[in-house]
Image (cartoon, grey):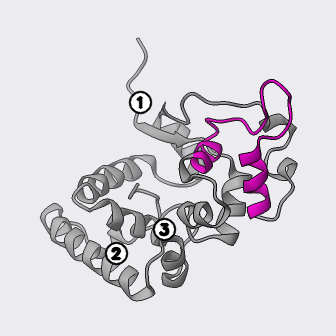
């Protein structure tokens, strides 16, 4: 019998080259969609690798892939190198179970047991947040770097002040829940990508 795992990790697989190129030039996929005339659902299908950029019959680039590449001023082969051109995923997310030792090896000197307890408490607290509040906190304090208010505002298509208000509201809500759980605000305001 396999021992119980300490962590269940969610993984999202995306075309990072395409996603980075879009983020450089546009505030959102919706903005790109409006500007280049490709439906946002199609752009998302390319990002999530649920659609291939090549025509199955001819092997030529699909018009939508060419339009997307043109919209970010890139050559299609820069966004879809040869090893990605035929990849089509039926599911772009998955989960994997890890032991505390495996998490330690990933995180370096982190104490896996403290991380587990901390993440469970934070997850319980963050479950009370709206999806918008979780997104703001993840952009500001999660994995992938800390966004400034201005960067967050650009990414979400909101004003800097609105992002500040959403963040403050989320922390007020979390502080109320943390008081019940015996945490301090500093333990909540930690990097960790726990708000997704």
**Residue at the (62%, 64%) spot, across then down:** 32
Tag 3, which secondary structure?
helix
Q: Residue at x 57, y 48 (%)?
A: 44
Quadrant of the drawing holding the C terminus: bottom left
Mark 1 = which residue? 5
Residue interval drawn in magenta: 42-71
Q: Mark 1 or mark 3: name the one nearer the start of the chain.
A: 1
From the top left corner, tell me how far across and down residue 84 is, in percent: 78, 37
42 in relation to 126, above or below:
above
Mark linked to residue 139: 3
Q: CB atoms at circles 3 and 2 under 8 Å apart? A: no
**Residue 54 at x, y = what percent?**
79, 35
Mark 1 vs mark 3, foreground winner is: 3
Magenta region includes residue 48: yes
Q: Is residue 78 magenta?
A: no
Q: Nearer the viewer, residue 105 or 138?
A: 138
Label placed on residue 186? 2
- Spot the residue most to the top: 1
**Badge 2 vs badge 1, beta-carbon distance below 8 Å:** no
Tell me residue 23's x, y (percent). 64, 66
């Amino acid at each position: 019998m396999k021992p119980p795992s300490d962590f269940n990790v969610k993984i999202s697989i995306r075309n990072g080259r395409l996603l980075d190129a879009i983020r450089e030039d546009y505030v959102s996929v919706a903005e790109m969609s409006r500007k280049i005339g490709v439906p946002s659902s199609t752009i998302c299908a390319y990002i999530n690798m649920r659609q291939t950029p090549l025509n199955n019959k001819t092997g030529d680039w699909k018009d939508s892939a060419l339009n997307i590449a043109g919209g970010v001023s890139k050559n299609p082969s820069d966004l879809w190198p040869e090893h990605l051109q035929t990849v089509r995923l039926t599911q772009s997310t998955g989960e994997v179970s890890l032991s505390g030792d495996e998490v330690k090896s990933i995180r370096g000197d982190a104490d896996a047991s403290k991380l587990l307890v901390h993440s469970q408490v934070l997850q319980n607290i963050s479950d009370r947040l709206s999806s918008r509040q979780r997104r703001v906190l993840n952009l500001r304090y999660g994995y992938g770097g800390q966004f400034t208010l201005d960067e967050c505002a650009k990414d979400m298509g909101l004003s800097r002040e609105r992002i500040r208000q959403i963040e403050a509201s989320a922390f007020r809500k979390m502080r109320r829940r943390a008081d019940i759980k015996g945490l301090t605000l500093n333990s909540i305001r930690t990097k960790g990508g726990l708000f997704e």
